[in-house]
Image: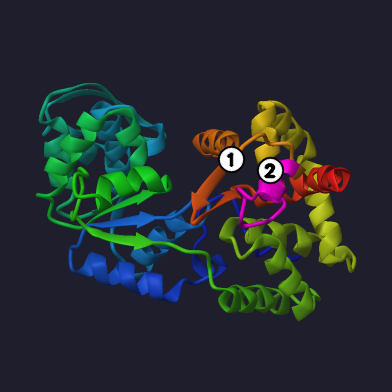
Amino acid sequence: MVENPFIFGKVVSGEHFCDRVEELKQIKKLVGSRQHTVVISPRRYGKTSLVINALERSKTPFIYVDCSILEDDKGIVAAVLNEYVKKFDNIAIVEKFLKRFDFTFSLSLNPVNVTVSHVKIDSLKTLLMEVSKNYVLVFDEFQDLYEKDKTLVNKMRSIIQFLDRSVIMLGSKRHLLDNMFLKPRGIFYNFGYALHLEKIQRPEFKKFIISWFNKTNVKTEASDVEKILDTTECHPFFTQYFCHFFFEKRLSEKAPVEQTLQDILQMNSAFYEETYRSLPVGQRKALLLLSYGKKEVYSADLLEKFGITSSQALQKALNALVKKEIADKNGTYHILDLFFKHWLYGKTLKVANQAV
């Protein structure tokens, strides 16, 4: 049985990772010079896979922490500890290590898990300073801590500036990260190197996709790959997602790219319909307008075509969609889920045609 080489929805490593050659070099260099780094990109651009691949390929030991599920310093302490104790192969060493710190904990086995019930004011500082002697700390979705507790982020900054090794902070909410790292009054202003991760370049992605079809002896044409990249706009997650299902189809039949897209939309249609119906009418209209694909979203013709009363009403709806993480703005407004955008486009054509 041929293994599907296109992986999505989790960290990808090794030959399944579509190499971002320059970015990998950059991260390795920054870590080698002990430079703190923030990696900024929209969700699902592969920043976690990028950082982990860079560290693994350079044989740099690291501790990974997902900040999106943490609430306070006790949560950070527990998360760092549970990653750190995985590095030990002896429970006696784990217990000896834990007793060095001023927090209350319990320890369970098979697998080893540390539950922290109480921390003191310096517990987080003491732990991070100890761990960073030998490990690079990676804090994913770091801006989520900023949303929950700005005081905690201030505390983190005061600790991180004294750590021995690099700290890598990853984030996807650009407006929050800009406030934290790039604005003069930001908590982390001029604190480290900011790496903005863009979509994978089309030639690089095309080469990667064709290479895997050739390696697995599954037939496809260069024109098919061009259509895929047109459909997914070279978005890392949605390209891998599409290629996964297209590859499965090509194992048994010579299905066209267009059929794969329709199957994906049908598979997700119930979820998309529920999402769409849950929104106020003004936000639905704004989504349909965005899916229409015009850059000048505030033009009088478009507003009239989609029954939007004013540019102010559209702006209000777009801001709400950004807050709900259904849309985003990077120069221009766009729908984050590309397949949702394609699904909406079917509805959009009906509205647009009725308005003609």
**Does the magenta run of residues contain 293?**
yes
Locate residue 36, reporting x and y percent: 22, 57
Q: Tell me if residue 53 can be seen.
A: yes
Residue type highlighted by circle 2: Leu
Query: In the rendered image of this protein, does residue 18 appear above or below residue 161?
Result: below
- Which residue occupies the foreground of this view, 337 or 76? 337
Is residue 64 shown to the viewer in this render? no
Relative horizontal placement of residue 245, taking residue 65 as reference (left or right): right
- Tell whether position 186 is magenta: no
Which quarter of the figure has residue 191?
bottom left
Q: Position of residue 19 (x, y in %)?
A: 49, 72
Q: Which mark is residue 303?
A: 2
Element at label 1: helix
User: From the image, which quarter does the N terminus lie in?
Assistant: bottom right
Q: Label 1 to label 2, Cα distance in Å?
A: 7 Å
Q: Which residue is labeled 1 in the image?
A: 311
- Please state which amino acid type lies under the numbered disc 1: Ser
Circles 1 and 2: CB atoms closer than 8 Å? yes
